[in-house]
Amino acid sequence: MSVSLYESRIRQARTTLESERRKQASEEQKAAKLDAAAAELRRKAANAQSSSVAAGYSKQAEGKERDARKARAAGAKHSGEVAKAQTKLHDAEAKLRDAQAAEQSREAAKRKQEHKKREREEKRERARREREEQRRRDAEQRAAADQARQISDLQRQTVGLRARLEEVSRRNAPAEITVLFLASSPEDEAQL
């Protein structure tokens, strides 16, 4: 059961306990007053000068004593109710402690479960980030490899085009090349 239920039962038991204690104390005070009144009436009966007055006092004293016995019996009944209320209070307090311990245990288990769940989620998130990072690195490596391949292809094409240009220029070159030397005077130059 819930903690609040046992807290409610404890409040109820304390209220009942206090009420029964007040009733018990009231009945005991009433019995003490009646005993004192009966004792006073017995004393008056003993000191009375006529037997009829003494009998009247004695009869009144007996009534007060009977009422005192009833008040003591009611006080005893309330004392029993006090004991029952104390038992209920102790039981409710014990059950409250048990319920609180169970609730704390449940909360601790829940916190532990939430912690494990959070750890699993963090682990999944780390793994996802690592996979993303690996994909990014792989994509960068593929892009770098593609770029290197393209550069290599372009270099091959360049070499091939240069070779063709040289070949075309050799084919189109004249068989003889006339060279004209300019000198300040023809005597300065040696003949060829």
Image: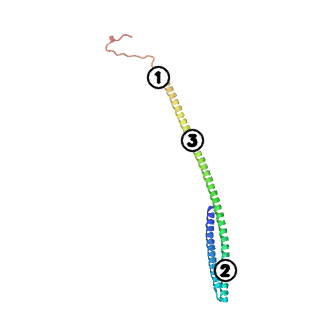
Q: Position of residue 40 (x, y in %)?
A: 62, 81
Which residue carries the number 1 mark? 169
Which residue carries the number 3 mark? 130
Q: Position of residue 37 (x, y in %)?
A: 62, 81
Vertical placement of 177 versus 87: above or below?
Answer: above
Along the line of sight, which residue is nearer the eye, 82 or 65?
Answer: 65
Along the line of sight, which residue is nearer the eye, 42 or 106?
Answer: 42
Side (left or right) of 3 relative to 173? right
Which residue carries the number 2 mark? 65
Q: CA distance from mark 1 to mark 2?
A: 150 Å
Vertical placement of 86 versus 111: above or below?
Answer: below
Instruction: For the residues labelled 1 and 2, say whether their Cβ atoms are less than 8 Å apart.
Output: no
Q: CA distance from mark 2 to mark 3?
A: 95 Å
Q: Residue furthest left?
A: 184
Q: Amino acid at mark 1?
A: Ser
Say whether residue 1 is visible. Answer: no
Vertical placement of 38 versus 180: above or below?
Answer: below
Q: Position of residue 170 (x, y in %)?
A: 47, 21
Q: Secondary structure at mark 3?
A: helix
Q: Amino acid at mark 3?
A: Glu
Q: Amino acid at mark 2?
A: Glu
Going 63% across and 67% down the picture, which residue do you hit? Answer: 13
| Number of marks drawn | 3
Q: Secondary structure at mark 2?
A: helix
Q: CA distance from mark 1 to mark 3?
A: 57 Å
Query: Earlier along the polypeptide chain: callout 1 or callout 3?
Result: 3
Query: Earlier along the polypeptide chain: callout 1 or callout 2?
Result: 2
Say whether residue 159 is visible. Answer: yes
